[in-house]
Image: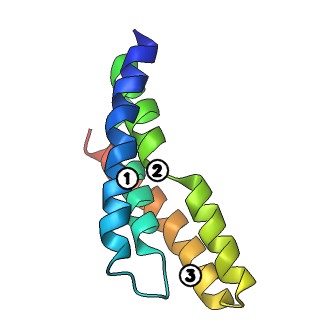
């Protein structure tokens, strides 16, 4: 049952991430990868909402949906690329915004439960 719930959540989370990323990249401002920031903040909110729920809700929405929806690898690569292209202040801003907004989103989601 656990594997099924995780798979169902991931089956929705990954395609949704792809669609959001694809559509927001069209309007990207060259400074920050806002699509990845938005996706990771929304995923953090979902984790905050599900953290104190039942195990099955955690498997479906936390591990499955949020795990497939969020993207640490894209965040790491984009941050690396910003540093590599000497856009240090943008890289630090992106890093700080992602971590701060992600933690705040998780806290807000947790407070709502």
Whether tag 3 and tag 1 are in contact, CB under 8 A, the answer is no
> Separation of disc 1 and disc 2 at Cα?
7 Å
- Residue at 57 percent of width and 60 percent of height: 74
Q: Which of marks 1 and 2 is in front?
A: 1
- Residue at 49 percent of width and 88 percent of height: 31
- Residue at 65 percent of width and 65 percent of height: 77
Mark sitting earlier along the chain (3/1)? 1
* Image quadrant in which you'd find residue 46: top left
> Separation of disc 3 and disc 1 at Cα?
22 Å
Query: What number is the disc on residue 17?
Result: 1
Residue 8 lies, with reference to residue 104, above or below; the image says: above
* Image quadrant in which you'd find residue 85: bottom right
**Which image quarter is the C terminus in?**
top left
Residue 78 lies, with reference to residue 67, above or below; the image says: below
Mark sitting earlier along the chain (3/2)? 2
Whether tag 1 and tag 2 are in contact, CB under 8 A, the answer is yes
Q: Which of marks 3 and 1 is in front?
A: 1
Mark sitting earlier along the chain (1/2)? 1
Residue with the mark numbered 2? 70
Of residues 34 and 48, the one drawn nearer to the viewer in this rendering: 34
């Amino acid at each position: 049952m656990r594997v099924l719930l995780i798979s169902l959540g991931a089956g929705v989370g990954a395609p949704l991430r792809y669609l959001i990323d694809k559509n927001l990249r069209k309007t990207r401002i060259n400074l920050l990868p806002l699509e990845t920031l938005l996706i990771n903040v929304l995923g953090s909110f979902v984790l905050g909402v599900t953290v104190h729920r039942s195990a099955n809700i955690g498997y479906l929405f936390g591990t499955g949906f949020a795990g497939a929806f969020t993207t640490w690898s894209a965040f790491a690569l984009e941050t690396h690329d910003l540093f590599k292209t000497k856009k240090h202040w943008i890289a630090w801003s992106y890093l700080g915004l992602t971590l701060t907004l992600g933690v705040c989103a998780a806290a807000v989601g947790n407070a709502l439960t």
